Image (cartoon, rainbow, N blue to C red):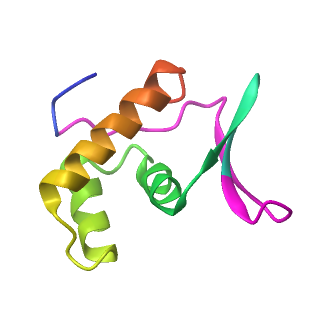
Amino acid sequence: MNADHTWRPRLASRARLKFDPIAQQEMLLFPEAALALNETGAAIVRLCDGAHSIDEIVDQLSKKYDNADRDALMREVMDFLATIRARGLLQ
């Protein structure tokens, strides 16, 4: 995983975020499967637009979740990005 917090992750062209009205949750869709996302995961994916650095993503989430612990959020974001990046869903 790129530990550079200035990296600006962007969803791969083969992946897309879609709300599943039946499951009532966000899904990350890609050709071979789909990944059900919790609210935080969906919020992270929405910010993976190539315009936000890791630090900016964490800052946005910290504001969204009532100034949540930034270090804990950073770990959660980095772990989540590592997981979806390993599946080839980030560039």
- The structure residue drawn at horizontal position 13% and vertical position 52%, both measured from the top left corner, is 71
Q: From this viewpoint, is residue 72 visible?
A: yes
- Judged by its main secondary structure, the magenta piece is loop
Position of residue 7 measured from the top left corner of the image (x, y, whole percent): 24, 35
Position of residue 58 measured from the top left corner of the image (x, y, whole percent): 24, 56
12 lies above or below 42:
above
Residue 30: image quadrant is top right
Whether residue 8 sits left or right of residue 87 in the image: it is left
Q: From this viewpoint, is residue 30 visible?
A: no
- The structure residue drawn at horizontal position 50% and vertical position 56%, both measured from the top left corner, is 46
Position of residue 69 measured from the top left corner of the image (x, y, whole percent): 16, 64
Q: Is residue 83 magenta?
A: no
Of the pair 75 and 91, the residue shown nearer to us: 75
Read off the magenta span. 6-26
- The structure residue drawn at horizontal position 48% and vertical position 52%, both measured from the top left corner, is 41
Whether residue 28 sits left or right of residue 6 in the image: it is right
Whether residue 43 sits left or right of residue 71 in the image: it is right
